[in-house]
Image: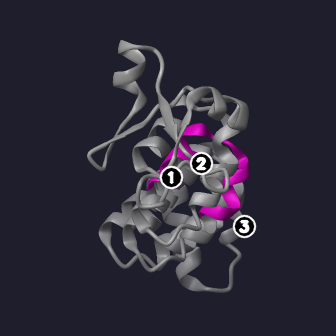
């Protein structure tokens, strides 16, 4: 895989060289070390606008770094990474999107709540809680009701709680749902939120 100078990446993405990576013996070294020492480096050649590693997949460390930087210009690349075939890549991208806090991620993260992989669902629910969008409340409530693991039950409940007062409206609407389990779940979570 070809390496591109950081200046080219800056022109391509607008936010590089915030991330630097260089391939050494098949391993990627992230920008932290390079930026602290020389202040210059290389980013791996972007494919379709997404940073990739030597195997041709989004680099998890880079997705994590983009999330920590909180730069919304990375959102389109991270949204594309949610469609990756590798679950770990999708999980890191979902986490980064939650950290950035851009509402464009809500709908794609809601889609991930239906994934078979438990860790993908867990990461998506956690990211949705960080985004705090009330439109996520009812899908999170459904995921809470259908939880097949205690971790999913906990993270979906925490995500709804993190949405806070804005979650109360959708939860009150769920009290009128014809399904008894939805009504029970909504009552329970409203009680946990301390809603009258």
Residue 130 visible in the snapshot:
yes
Res. 52 mark: 1
**Mark 1 and 2 residues: CB-CB less than 8 Å, in contact?**
yes
| Label 3 crowd bin: few (<14), some (14–19), many (20+), radius 10 Å | few
Please report the residue visible at 68 percent of the width from the left and 43 percent of the height from the top: 102
The Cα atoms of the two marked residues, 1 and 2, are separated by 6 Å
Q: Earlier in the sequence, mark 1 or mark 2?
A: 2
Residue 196 visible in the snapshot:
no
Res. 104 mark: none
First to last magenta residue range: 92-109
Q: Secondary structure at mark 2?
A: loop
Q: Position of residue 49 (x, y in %)?
A: 66, 50
Residue 102 is inside the magenta segment: yes
Residue bearing the label numbered 3? 173
Question: Extreme bottom residue here?
Answer: 179
Q: Position of residue 61 (x, y in %)?
A: 40, 43
| Label 2 crowd bin: few (<14), some (14–19), many (20+), radius 10 Å | some
The Cα atoms of the two marked residues, 3 and 1, are separated by 43 Å
Which circle, 3 or 1, is nearer the viewer? 1
Question: Extreme left residue here?
Answer: 25
64 relative to 183 in the view: left or right = left
Please report the residue visible at 46 percent of the width from the left and 15 percent of the height from the top: 39
From the viewer's side, name the closer residue of 1 and 114: 1
Q: Secondary structure at mark 1?
A: loop
Res. 46 mark: 2
Please report the residue visible at 41 percent of the width from the left and 54 percent of the height from the top: 54
Q: Secondary structure at mark 3?
A: helix
Q: Is residue 9 above or below residue 195?
A: above
Please report the residue visible at 48 percent of the width from the left and 64 percent of the height from the top: 188
């Amino acid at each position: 895989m070809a390496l591109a100078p950081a200046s080219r990446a800056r022109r391509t993405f607008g936010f590089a060289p915030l991330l630097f990576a260089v391939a050494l013996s098949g391993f990627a070294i992230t920008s932290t070390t390079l930026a602290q020492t020389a202040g210059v480096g290389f980013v791996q050649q972007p494919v379709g606008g997404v940073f990739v590693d030597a195997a041709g997949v989004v680099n998890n460390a880079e997705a994590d770094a983009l999330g920590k930087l909180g730069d919304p210009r990375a959102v389109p690349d991270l949204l594309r990474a949610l469609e990756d075939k590798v679950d770990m890549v999708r999980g890191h991208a979902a986490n980064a999107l939650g950290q950035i806090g851009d509402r464009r991620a809500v709908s794609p993260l809601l889609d991930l709540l239906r994934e078979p992989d438990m860790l993908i669902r867990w990461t998506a629910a956690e990211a949705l809680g960080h985004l705090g969008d009330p439109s996520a409340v009812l899908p999170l409530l459904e995921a809470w009701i259908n939880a097949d693991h205690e971790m999913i039950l906990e993270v979906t409940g925490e995500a709804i709680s993190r949405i806070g007062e804005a979650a109360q409206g959708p939860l009150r609407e769920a009290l009128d749902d014809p399904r008894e389990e939805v009504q029970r779940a909504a009552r329970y979570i409203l009680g946990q939120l301390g809603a009258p």
